[in-house]
Image (cartoon, rainbow, N blue to C red):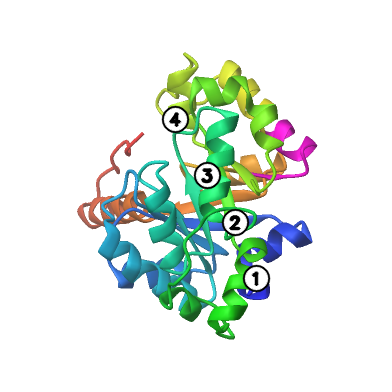
Amino acid sequence: MQASNRLKTSFLQGTQTFGGWQMLPGANVSRLLARSGVDWVLVDCEHGNIDDAAMHDAVPAIAAVGASPIVRLADMQGWMVKRALDSGAHGILVPLVRTVDEAKQLVMEAKFPPQGRRGFGSLIALERFNPNPTLTEYLHQANDALLTIIQIETREAFDDVESIAAVEGVDALFIGPFDLGNNIGHPVQKGVIGPELKAALARILAAAHNAGKKCGIYCKDSEQAKEFASQGYDMLTAVTDYTALQHAAGHELSNAKGVAAGAGVF
């Protein structure tokens, strides 16, 4: 199982990964992102237009292409962890975490006993790995093969980031610069990250690496992804479906009309 989890394998090999971010529902969108050459696709059930049924369509479409489907939960609730992992996701990204205890509880929800309390019984998950494991193999391998990623975006989580990074079973920290900036009083303005927020990002990156964990970050575009890649992040967003479609449509229309393109979303 672990060998077919592309993101987990890259983490173990120490190689940087680039991913796609899916906000729009539809297996065709999932496949387009996965076939672009990314290592993983994040299915965004928090801020995207992705409900439970759309998530169950996206995860197999991504896995079938050979990329890792990662699901961002809508909230840090145990039943959401179960639904995402039972769909066959190769990992979960959990938003809104504030404390060490919450991080520990999420690890418990994501692991089978004795390490945790995840319920056992989804046959659907087996199909998202190649070769397909048996149910028994999935039971014994899932705890090591699947990823639990904690998003650092609240003031409380940032203040205790070193302790959260040290929680056993947390594989990586992931930074949401927009919410983090808002919550520590230094919001991103017109897509620009100020010096105070840059210092906060550096602290989170260092906390993750010092704890032997990986660190990812949401990037608004490919240029920002290159910048953060040079700083040593392990998991970087290269493209988001919504903004990529918006940019491409605006650019093509402006080009057809012979006028300057718009200012963009940020």
Quarter placement of the N terminus: bottom right
Q: Where's residue 53, x and y in %?
A: 26, 65
Q: Quadrant of residue 244?
A: bottom left
Q: Where's residue 36, x and y in %?
A: 48, 69
Q: Is residue 17 visible?
A: yes
Label disc, if present, on residue 178 of the rendered structure: 4
Identify the residue position indicated by label 3 in the image: 106
- Say above or below: 15 vs 185: below
Q: Are marks 1 and 2 in contact (CB under 8 Å)?
A: no
Q: Secondary structure at mark 3?
A: helix
Ranked by sequence position, the earlier of labels 1 and 3 is: 3
Three-letter amino acid code at disc 4?
Phe
Identify the residue position indicated by label 1 in the image: 141
Name the mark nearer the viewer: 4 or 2: 2
Q: CA distance from mark 1 to mark 4?
A: 35 Å
Q: Nearer the viewer, residue 166 or 181?
A: 166
Name the mark nearer the viewer: 3 or 4: 3
Identify the residue position indicated by label 2 in the image: 147
**What is the span of residues highlighted in magenta in the rendered image?**
205-215
Three-letter amino acid code at disc 1?
Gln
Ranked by sequence position, the earlier of labels 1 and 2 is: 1
Q: CA distance from mark 1 to mark 2?
A: 12 Å
